[in-house]
Image: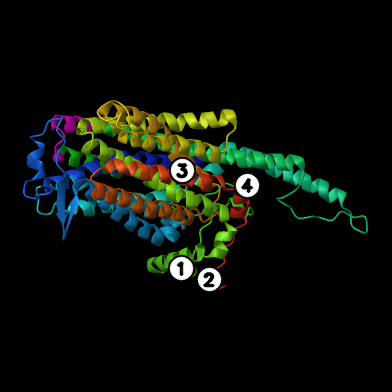
């Protein structure tokens, strides 16, 4: 019989296996290409705006750069590459609003699973509907709506998925073993303390169990427990990333067949997106069967409040609209200065995450558009890059935890190293402005360099995603994981609205998307001092003792 932990663990991994495919196949590869192609198929060559872009493309060879293509949206003419970026910006903005509204719902164990699956299947259905929507249809602009729904569904479901991560780590056998040793040591210290402190009548006085006992053994075990919990959280998070990447790579190979046979037609791109939606929907079924539906799933003693995954059940009959209203009120309360001071290190990480998530997301999307519009890479080559990045990401997800254990690095230190390594990618692209590299190898001016950078960036990206999620888990108040992962997602998505928008403006104003690499370097390096200032030990203690003070109080 499968244990409760293994069943929950497999259910969590199954959704990582299902949902990450949408990110790898669609969100970072086919969706931006497809949206750009939808705009291009309905756009005109600049500046005359009389000749169709699609008619010109067929006449160009690899040595002739295509003219700038613009499409009319409402009263505005925008670059076809910018159309994809603007749609993504709109989707992450709406995603942030949705995540705020459902954060409290996901913290209710009876509703977390329902929320996860509802959003998952809504997003999967929207992705699947790309197949019947043709770029030649007068309703081609609905592609933007489908992209928004799919992205919102994915982001919201991941908030509910991430809320399971802290309790999964706490319930893992290796962590429970260390925790049991810690409790035994604390009880032994209590006995010694009782025997050593008689009262005035020479009778032992029972003392309450104190978590912050100064016994050397207890302190050592407590440190061991925190380190083991941190490493286990990183391991589970990284393995979920690696498993999802593996699924994405498999489906990319499948999608490569029709895209290659159809020579990168718009239909083949739509088919690839639809396949990711079908995969997403089908492989979410094990999560339906294995994830717990409600109640307290913790295996730790009920009297230990800091380890219990509780549900903040509102008094009286539960109401969706009341919960949404309460979520917005709670968000306002969480952002008060008095609350920020209580969890200052949590908010320091969120400040760095605002910059980091935006930079990594924008690097991924910008690189694909840069490869297509500047390096004139064919869809089959872009798919190969899409395969290389997650393949290298799997290696990174498995390699960095081993390196961390060998050198006893903290999650914070690993993130700082990954950040510096990632900044070299856009910095290398900036070298393309130097005349010595123009027309030659170097500075990301050739297609071959794009493949090399895909290996390098994937190796960093896979580990970064897992470690960022795990590091943040160390600063979460127990029982409020979904609410705080919602804030994590809000920070991610609110910043992701900013990055693609700026890159779109840079592309529109300069006509050269390469200038955006300077912007990305600045964003990455700006996050380093903020991330370095996070005090991990104090952040953990503050989160465990945190009590929210309502606005009314």
- Could you give the CA–CA distance between mark 3 and mark 4, rounded to whole angstroms? 24 Å
Of all residues shown, which one is farthest toward the bottom? 552
Q: Residues within 10 Å of mark 2 (few under 14, many from 20)?
A: few
For marks 1 and 3, the one nearer the N-term is 1
Q: Which residues are magenta?
A: 254-267
Depth check, mark 1 against mark 3: the one in front is 3
Mark nearer the N terminus (2 vs 3): 3
For label 3, the residue is 525
List the residue tagged with mark 2: 551
Query: Which label belongs to residue 117?
Result: none
Q: Position of residue 245 (x, y in %)?
A: 36, 35
Question: Which residue is tagged 1?
Answer: 329
| Residue 537, numbered circle | 4
> For the stretch drawn in magenta, what is the main secondary structure?
helix
Is any part of residue 291 visible from this angle? no
Dots 1 and 2: beta carbons under 8 Å? yes
The answer to whether the residue labelled 1 contacts the one labelled 3, judged by CB atoms less than 8 Å apart, is no
Which element carries disc 4, helix, strand or loop? helix
Q: Secondary structure at mark 3?
A: helix
- Examine the structure image and report whether residue 552 is included in the region drawn in magenta: no
């Amino acid at each position: 019989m499968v244990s409760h932990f293994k069943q929950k663990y497999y259910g969590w991994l199954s959704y990582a296996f299902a949902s990450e495919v949408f990110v790898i196949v669609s969100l970072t590869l086919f969706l931006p290409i497809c949206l750009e192609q939808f705009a291009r198929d309905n756009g005109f060559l600049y500046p005359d705006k009389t000749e169709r872009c699609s008619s010109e493309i067929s006449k160009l060879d690899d040595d002739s750069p295509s003219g700038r293509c613009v499409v009319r949206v409402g009263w505005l003419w925008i670059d076809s590459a910018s159309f994809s970026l603007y749609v993504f910006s709109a989707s992450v903005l709406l995603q942030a609003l949705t995540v705020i509204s459902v954060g409290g719902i996901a913290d209710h164990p009876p509703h977390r699973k329902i929320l996860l699956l509802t959003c998952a299947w809504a997003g999967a259905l929207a992705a699947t509907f790309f197949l019947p929507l043709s770029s030649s249809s007068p309703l081609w602009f609905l592609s933007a709506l489908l992209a928004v729904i799919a992205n919102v569904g994915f982001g919201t479901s991941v908030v509910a998925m991430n809320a399971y991560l802290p309790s999964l780590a706490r319930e893992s056998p290796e962590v429970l073993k260390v925790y049991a040793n810690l409790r035994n040591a604390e009880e032994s210290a209590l006995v010694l303390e009782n025997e050593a402190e008689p009262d005035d009548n020479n009778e032992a006085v029972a003392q309450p169990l104190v978590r912050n006992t100064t016994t050397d053994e207890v302190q050592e075990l407590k440190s061991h427990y925190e380190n083991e919990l941190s490493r286990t959280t990183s391991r589970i998070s990284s393995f979920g990333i690696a498993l999802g990447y593996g699924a994405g790579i498999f489906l990319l190979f499948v999608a490569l067949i029709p895209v290659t046979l159809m020579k990168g037609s718009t239909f083949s791109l739509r088919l690839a997106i639809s396949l990711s939606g079908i995969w997403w929907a089908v492989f979410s079924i094990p999560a339906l069967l294995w994830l717990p539906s409600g109640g307290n799933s913790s295996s730790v003693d009920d009297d230990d409040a800091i380890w219990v995954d509780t549900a903040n059940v509102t008094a009286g009959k539960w109401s969706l609209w009341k919960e949404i209203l309460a979520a917005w009120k709670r968000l306002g309360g969480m952002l008060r200065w008095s609350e920020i001071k209580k969890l200052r290190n949590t908010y320091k990480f969120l400040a760095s995450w605002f910059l980091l998530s935006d930079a990594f997301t924008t690097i991924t999307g910008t690189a694909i558009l840069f490869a297509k519009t500047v390096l004139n890479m064919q869809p089959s080559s872009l798919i190969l890059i899409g395969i290389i990045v997650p393949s290298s990401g799997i290696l990174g997800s498995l390699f960095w935890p081993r390196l961390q254990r060998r050198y006893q690095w903290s999650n914070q230190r690993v993130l700082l190293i990954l950040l510096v390594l990632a900044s070299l990618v856009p910095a290398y692209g900036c070298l393309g402005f130097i005349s010595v590299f123009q027309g030659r190898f170097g500075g990301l001016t050739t297609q071959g360099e794009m493949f090399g950078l895909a290996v390098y960036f994937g190796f960093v990206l896979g580990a970064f995603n897992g470690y960022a999620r795990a590091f943040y888990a160390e600063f979460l108040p127990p029982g409020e994981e979904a609410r705080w992962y919602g804030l994590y997602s809000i920070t991610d998505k609110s910043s992701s609205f900013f990055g693609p928008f700026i890159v779109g403006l840079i592309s529109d104003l300069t006509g050269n998307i390469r200038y955006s690499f300077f912007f990305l370097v600045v964003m990455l390096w700006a996050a380093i001092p903020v991330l370095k200032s996070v005090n991990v030990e104090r952040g953990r203690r503050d989160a465990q003792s945190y009590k929210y003070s309502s606005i009314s109080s």
